Image: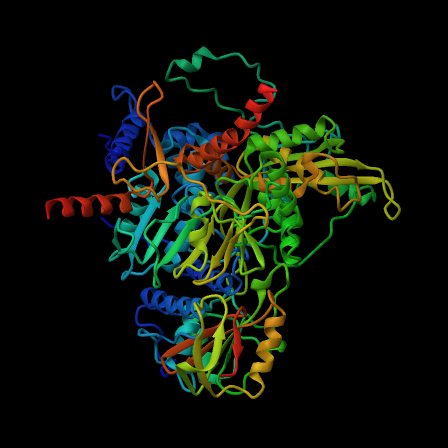
Amino acid sequence: MSGLLPGFADPVLDAQSSFRAVLEAMSRPGRVQRLPRAPSPPAPLGAAAGAVLLALVDSATPLFIDAGADAVEWVRFHAGCPIVPGAGEAEFVLCTGTAPRLASLRQGTDEEPQGSATLILQVDALEEGTGWRLTGPGIEREHGLRVRGLPEGFLAEWKANGARFPRGVDVILCDGDRIAALPRSLRIEEG
Amino acid sequence: MYVAVKGGEAAIANAHSWLAEERRGDPSVPELSTGQIREQMTLAVDRVMAEGSCYDPGLAALAIKQARGDLIEAIFLLRAYRTTLPRFGASLPIDTGMMRVRRRVSATYKDLPGGQILGPTFDYTHRLLDFALAAEGHVPLPVPETDPGEDTACPRVTAMLADEGLMAPEQPSDAEPGDLTRTPLSYPAGRPLRLQNLARADEGFLLSMAYSTQRGYGNNHPFVGELRQGEVTVEILPPELGFPIEIGDITVTECQMVNQFNGSRTEPPQFTRGYGLVLGRTERRAMSMALVDRALRAEELGEEIAAPAQDEEFVLSHSDNVEATGFLEHLKLPHYVDFQSELEVVRAMRAAAAPAALREAAE
Amino acid sequence: MTTEGYNFAYLDEGTKRMIRRALLKAVAVPGHQVPFGSREMPLPYGWGTGGIQVTASVVGPDDVLKVIDQGADDTTNAVSIRRFFARVAPGLRTTERTAEATIIQTRHRIPETPLREGQVMVYQVPQPEPLFKLEPRRAETKRLHALADYGLMQVKLYEDIARHGRVGSSYDHPVMVGGRYLMAPSPIPSFDNPKMHLSPALQLFGAGRERRLYAVPPYTEVRSLDFDDHPFVPLRASGSCALCGADHTYLDEMVTDDRGGRLFVCSDTDYCGERQEQQAAERAA
């Protein structure tokens, strides 16, 4: 384990501040949040994705992760979460490469929509105030968000995801040490 | 000029000091030690351990002392402590067939392998206040020892019935049972979670529910197939060792109630089981649990659900005295905001009704 | 004074993570009750254990916490909960000022001072199920929520109107969140219901004994249930505060003697105190 990179410097308080950033992101979709106390996980995992993982996953949450052996070892060591081979079985799905189709992930049920997957997606860039026009809970009038590095057809998938409400996947987008979230209640229109 | 009530902080501090003084009582009387409680209030300690879901007689005794003998308060103290403990793993299932039996009674057979052992019971005492106990220094006569027979298996009455094909078999399962202290119950809860809930349910509630089934509220025709009490060994299986190791002994009480079952289209007439297993020498609750367990099997056995004790959601969601007492006692908290809103509504409705009443009176 | 031997904010990290995951799902499905593995707390069920667990999972040392009960910071249970967090969360500041707080844990009121972005309201909820008086079986109400079948509640409101001439509940009046979920606003007076609608603050709800939590994100539609011809009308005592003169706040009624003497004071002690200070400053100037 000599090559293992450290997790949070302060597992209690860093997890708290990271969670607060995720909560803020989920509550105000399209607002980009910085994670000042993020760890430095092994590549290709970015700082924000690492922080979100360590703040939320543990032995109770099956994780699918596509970021390679070092990342798996890192998250297993620091979070102790079971790693599952298929994204469809996971409660948390972390993708650094091609994102799986939203419809292929756990959706929850109408009685228990909280059983759906959370997709943590590393993207190329997040920019606030431009691009997509976001409306819905958490947004006073309209937020703008430009995301680079999403799979083609994502907006159509997002529309289908919204049509399944209250079922549906929630997404956390990560870029470096910054995040933005797309809760399933969010409506997105091309800017 | 009106001045709002202040000083919540001071009031709380004073209340705590007063409480401590009341707990101690007259200081000229020697203070109770937790050892005295543990050794001489054993059934109170056992109840607190059973409903507190934590087998530690010393902590239970401390909780009883701190709670001034209020057992529900003591159970709450132990539960609140329990949730802060780290979990190292789960034990293997205990084997009550290997129990070192100190008491064993069957109401269904006059004699049976392993015998009837009356043990230390109130059953045949005459309930006369014993004034000799009021005088201190009373040492009871030693009991003539009988050889308990080292670790001999004591066959179960239900197994004897099963051998004859008269006892409905239980559904075996290797599935990991849920843990109601970690995951909220949803309904139907299923039998493993049901038994977990009943094992720590309030004794008074369990007793009343069980009693109601005996009076016709629920379809029970119970016999105490067997009631056994004694020590069992707890083992864990550390994954790095690969073989079980013993971590200690606990005292438990197990009750298997035998109930007649008329049979159904698919099942022949036979007996069915109600099961009770509890921590400590808490016989009343083991019996109550077995009766309520059987009543709650109504749906599984295709019986009509007509009585409260057969209603799983009703029984399981009202059985916990820590929840119940908290919610009941929260009525002591200020509710004046809500009461004010009720006042305004009642006044508004009376004002709206008044003109109509006046008109009617005038006509 | 802090208490040694406990984790920051009392709960262990595993429990916090479990609650945090549930909170994120609750925010994503506004108004939906998410079950969670509520723990026994050192305070009794029914006394705010749900709110305490939510606050404990959210709070950090940079937060400023305000705790109110009945609108007041100095009611005994508010004092007790504030002291609890002061003991178990080193670094945390507490305040009685609504404007200064980043987290406000409340029982039965929403402050009069308008909330702002960056604030989190944490409601203590005794009964999260808005339908429980009409259908006590949670297995059944869960199904009704899944189907968005709220006919039972409509019938109940209609009967209230027929019987009392108005839409009934004086407190805990049910609301529709985001046009989808029927939600219990917790036992706040209906006077406070409109403050939930499009609030800039994040609103979190914790029911410890019933093991449910739910959320209303900022700027989310929260409509009190009513009918077009019988609109929801929030009620307050008609009068003004004997201390600050406010005629727009929710008032507590005080019985001053046994001959029918009454006076009213603001239920929100911070708001009232601030108004009094302001008035004193104006008089001095």
> Is residue B1 rendered to the left or right of residue C189?
left
As rendered, which of A106 and B211 lies closer to the eye?
A106
Asked if residue B153 shows in the view, the reply is no
Residue A183 placement (x, y as % from top left): 50, 70
Quick check: C64 left or right of C54?
Answer: left
Marks counted in the figure total 0
Query: In the image, residue A6 lies at what x, y percent?
Result: 34, 77
- Seen as rendered, the residue at the extreme front is B363
Residue A96 shown left or right of residue B192 in the figure:
left
**A11, above or below B27, in the image:** below
Seen from the viewer's position, the closer of residues B4 and A13 is B4
Please name the colour scheme applied to the rendered image. rainbow
Q: Residue at x 52, y 54 (%)?
A: C223
In which image quadrant can residue B20 be found? top left
The residue sitting at the right extreme is B265
Residue A187, x across and y down, in percent: 53, 73
Relative to residue B150, is residue A109 depicted above or below? below
Q: Position of residue A5 (x, y in %)?
A: 36, 80
Q: Is residue A125 visible?
A: yes
For residue B111, side relative to residue C254 (left or right): right
Please give the name of the residue rendered at 66% of the width and 49% of the height, measured from the top-left corner: C151
Query: Quick one: B250 or C154, which is closer to the camera?
Result: C154
Q: Quadrant of residue C272?
A: top left
Q: Nearer the viewer, residue A138 or A98?
A: A138
Point out the image quarter for the N terminus of chain A: bottom left
